[in-house]
Amino acid sequence: MSSGTYISIVLGIIIATLAIFLLIALFGSRKTRRRLNQTDILTDELERHKKENMRLRAELKRLNSMTNLFFASMIRLTAKLNPLEIANETRGLLANYLDPEKIAIFVYDEKGKRLNIITQQGLDENWIPKIIYKLGEGKVGRAAATRFPVSRSELEFGNIKEPYPVFDPDICYPLVYQDRLYGVIAISIEKISEREKNLLGVVAMMTAVALNNTRSFESIQTSAITDPLTKLYNIAHFKDRLQEEIKRAQKFQHDLSIIIIDLDNFKDYNDTFGHHAGDQLLIKLAQIFRHHFDETDTVARYGGDEFIVMCPEIKKQEAVRIAGNLLQDLQLYDFTREGQKNHPSITFSAGVSSYPDDSSNYADLIKMADEALYEAKRAGRNNVRGYKPKIEKI
């Protein structure tokens, strides 16, 4: 082998070796860059997850805070015993959580079979007295009649005509508890999520529970101050009212009179027709008395066949005249019971006392009216007497 050939072979080996090292370096560099890129990607992903985790924690904290506030509002709501306070609490709650354009809370009038606004937000004040729904009328009336929520997004409303141009709610929830309708929540809102609908449903349910509690409380209160037979006030409540009214009369320098009414010969009536007939007579007389006296007067059952009336701002002689007119009017009523041809006339005797002429003490006023009543009895019954102080003989 010549020296030139040997040199060529050595150079070839060197060049090949260098090429191999260059290729290894090249591939190693690419692999390193790829690893570096992957590290960067992982770092970015980790940072993104970290930020997302922080965001989720903040959102969870916000939701926990909202949940605590929500349940605190629910506790306040169910603790209230006034329908207007309950409705206002509900309105404020929905305004904070849903931010609707308009809110109207309706209460159901069972006697009139209609729904009236008790509180609202976003409506023209001039329209509020006019917006009254009948059952089945508009979306509000439909929700009340069906006892189910009515939503614009879920139903076609082509056949539901809205009676009021100023109020076209998007969603209406009935206020129902134990199958009893208490009202409807109606709101206008551009968008509402399923979560917000669920929240609205919970609020509607708790509002209905609160309104039911109010009715139960009012029923208990009414029972505590009402005579169970005649549904007039009982004597305990009458005495409380009399004391309050005497204070008011003293403050404004007004007169005040009380009338005690006792039926004549009621025992004979019971003996003749039975106690059930006697009870029915007392119920009818209570209705007559309630109709005869003014709304500012307080009519109560004193006990047995006795009634007592407080007439604010009425002098004694005027009260005697009012009681006398009632005695005359009583003769116009037909008390004949079914199956009877003849029925005894119903008469009463009455006594009147007044503030400040007779006393400023409520117990004394009642006692004096009672004394005047027995003067009327002694005078032959079927008449009215005003209290006159006895003059002691010297």
Image: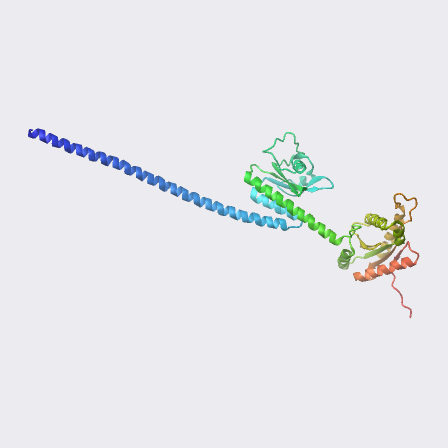
Query: Horizontal and vertical percent for residue 234?
Result: 78, 54
As drawn, 40 above or below 224: above
Q: Quadrant of residue 127?
A: top right
Q: Quadrant of residue 9?
A: top left
Taking the image as drawn, is residue 356 in sight?
Answer: no
In terms of depth relative to the viewer, which is nearer, 264 or 101? 264
Q: Could you tell me which quadrant the C terminus lies in?
A: bottom right
Name the residue at 91% across, 55% down.
381
Q: Could you tell me which quadrant the N terminus lies in?
A: top left
Tell me how many marks there are: 0
In terms of depth relative to the viewer, which is nearer, 295 or 29? 29
As drawn, 77 above or below 391: above
Query: Horizontal and vertical percent for residue 299?
Result: 80, 52
Residue at the left extreme of this rendering: 2
Query: Horizontal and vertical percent for residue 388?
Result: 88, 61
In terms of depth relative to the viewer, which is nearer, 314 or 16? 16
Name the residue at 71% across, 51% down.
220
Query: Horizontal and vertical percent for residue 261?
Result: 85, 54
Q: Is residue 5 left or right of residue 345?
A: left
Name the residue at 57% across, 48% down.
71
Q: Is residue 313 left or right of residue 106?
A: right
